[in-house]
Amino acid sequence: MSENDRRTDDAESRHGEVTRLLGELRLGHEDSLERLMPLVYRDLRKLAGSFMRREGASHTLPTTALVHEAYLRLADQRNGIELRFFAGLTEDETAAVLDISPRTVKRDWQVARAWLDREIGAPL
């Protein structure tokens, strides 16, 4: 087997594992996130590195920091959606709990509703 074939097999195997873990997360298996992150971290770093190279030398944020910032942003979005949907908090209450602006909460909520609308195929 060639090196290229091995890399392709590894990528396909990793892709299958990522898909399985994402499915587990959707079912509420929170521990799946701990197994998921190491699988996608290298790819996230590659994407972030590519992005940073296109942005030019004026950016001082290291690639790793960009990946971590994206992860934290996703976590905040998830928390905001949970607080709005499950706890019934208003935009202002959610913003206060997460220490973010109400505008950010509103934008995240709109993105989540648009995604859900697309997934279920009916307007909310």
Image (cartoon, rainbow, N blue to C red):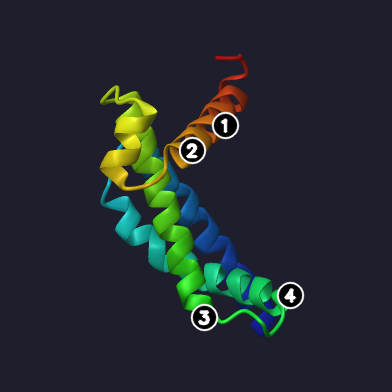
* N-terminal-most mark, 2 or 3: 3
The residues bearing labels 1 and 3 have C-alpha atoms spaced at a distance of: 30 Å
Query: Which residue has dot 3 on it?
Result: 62
**Quarter-of-image position of residue 7:** bottom right
Element under disc 3: loop
Q: Is residue 21 left or right of residue 97?
A: right
Q: Disc 2 designates what residue?
A: 103
Kind of residue sitting beneath label 4: Arg
* Residue 124 sits above or below residue 23 on the image: above
* Residue 1 vertical position relative to residue 68 in the rendered view, above or below: below
Residue 25 versus residue 115 in the image, above or below: below
Q: CA distance from mark 4 to mark 1?
A: 28 Å
Report the quarter where the C terminus lies.
top right
Q: Which residue is mark 4?
A: 54
The crowding category of the residue bearing disc 3, from other C-alpha atoms within 10 Å (few below 14, some 14 to 19, many at least 20), is few
Q: Which residue is drawn at the image coordinates 34% and 60% (left, top)?
A: 35
